[in-house]
Amino acid sequence: MHKVRVRFAPSPTGPLHIGGARSALFNYLYAVHQGGQLVLRIEDTDLERSKREYEEEIMTSLHWLGLSWDEGVDRGGPHSPYRQTERLSIYQDYVQELLDKDLAYPCFCTEEELEAEREALLAQGEMPRYSGKCRSLTEDERQAYQDSGHIPAIRFKVPENQVYVVHDLVRGQVTFESENEGDFIIMKSDGIPTYNFAVVIDDALMEITHVVRAEEHLANTPRQLMIYEALRFKRPEFAHISLILGEDRQKMSKRHGATSLIQYREMGYLPEALFNFLALLGWSPEGEEEILDHKQIADSFTLERVSRSPAVFDLDKLNWMNQQYVKRLDTQELNNRLQPFIAATAYAQQVEELSSEQLQWLMQAVRERLVCLKDIEQLLPIFFDEPKVEAEAGEVLSQPGVKQVLQTLSTHLPSTEDPDEYRQCIKAVVKELKLKAKDVFMPVRCALTGQVHGPDLHLIMAVWGLEETSRRLQKALERLED
Ligand code: GLU
């Protein structure tokens, strides 16, 4: 049996979207599972919209997600080049072959003529498709056009009354009739091939065995099958994966929030969480477990378990999943991942000045409260700003007995900065004053941080250290005197 070869073939006309990332991921997983190879091909034939920056950005996003490939623009391979604009002479040769076999013909119709034809068909309530006008030009007529400086596009002659059947590995058997296709352009007058033509030449020459791509390309498949047949190429297997919908069941778009992978990275989603989440958008493992690492997913990934129904992008689930992954990071790793996010805040310097122990406690304190790494922005002020007493906290502090709690605490402050010692000193107050734990913890929290909620108090105190903790305590007592 031939080794499985799949490809991801983005058009570099924008950043990598969630849908593209999911297609790339499914190809990657299939290759890894099958012990096959993945090719990254850049389909940049839309000269106006394609940009090298996007190409770089797409590759950076894919690497960030944790994908790698065996052949591609950045690493070469036996089927180089992997960028379509560098393969123009190859397409030219195959166009010539089709022309020579009378399976394609030059078309001299102008944009205006084609538009008028389209309008007329639409007005009659018919599907617009090319009339085939230039199919029947005589050699002399063609020559006359050429002589008067017209440069033709090349159209493929769609065979009549043919039925094309795809045994799609996800969608099952899909049938298309050639009646519904007009002769289509395979090479524009500027010598640039169209997608449906170039994709076939490349998939065939690059020995792709399985074309795994988005459902929106299912409608292009009959045209591609015609080219496979005309050039006597062996056709690959096809697997068209379902759309990704927003929670309102409409096709995922900017309206639904962030759509590019880079945006998720910037918000502080972990790549391993997104990898896991995207894998479950349209594929499901056999068991119930949803938190699965790279290896577990690749080990069980098959196209049979890819769903035919659309996948719904559930942001709450992604958030939950990201949180699970954040919680699993050890403090050192969490610190590494948080660094760029901390560096972007006003507290970068203060965090840098913490001792390694304080930094550890800071990490322990924030870990449970982060959904995304960027949430660190909201968590740092409590550690470094002077407390601004919020209304709810003010109410707690106005209760009788608060002063006594704070005074007693000041007599119990520990002599070491171990978080556990801070916990013990608060407990000592509980014991001495014979109060409920919450009637001590709450006023202390409100007095020292100005807020009713926040990370574990003993960890915050450990990050402050003794001097700062007792300074805050004194200040709080002074405020109570006023
Ligand atoms: N360049 C096409 C796209 O980005 C690839 C389609 C395919 O995989 O055949 O949609």
Image (cartoon, grey):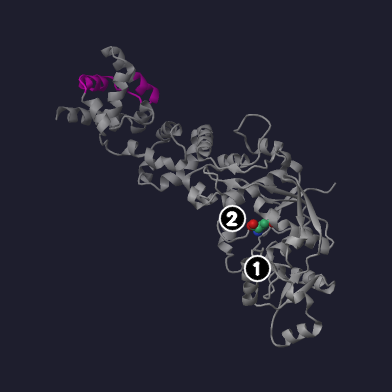
Residue corresponding to mark 2: 58
Q: Which amino acid, mark 1? A: Leu
The image shows residue 239 at horizontal and vertical percentages of: 72, 48
Residue at x 56%, y 39% (from the top left corner):
273
What residue is shown with label 1? 121
Foreground pick, 253 / 370: 253
Say what amino acid the circle numbered 2 marks: Ile
Front: mark 2 or 1: 1
| Helix, strand or loop at mark 2 | helix
Ligand 1 within 8 Å of the CB at mark 2: no
- Between residue 214 and residue 249, name the one nearer to us: 249
Q: Which mark is residue 349?
A: none
Q: Is residue 122 left or right of residue 352?
A: right
Could you say where residue 390 lies in the image, as x and y percent from the top left? 26, 34
State yes or no: residue 414 in magenta: yes
Q: Quadrant of ligand 1?
A: bottom right
Asked where in the image residue 196 lies, by quadrant, the reply is bottom right
- In this picture, which residue range is highlighted in magenta? 399-424
Q: Earlier in the sequence, mark 2 or mark 1?
A: 2
354 or 440: nearer the viewer: 440
Quadrant occupied by the C terminus = top left
Up the image or down, 297 lies above or below 417; here it is below
Question: For the residue labelled by badge 1, is the local secondary structure a helix, a strand or a loop?
Answer: helix
Location of residue 48 by image quarter: bottom right
Predominant SS along the magenta part: helix
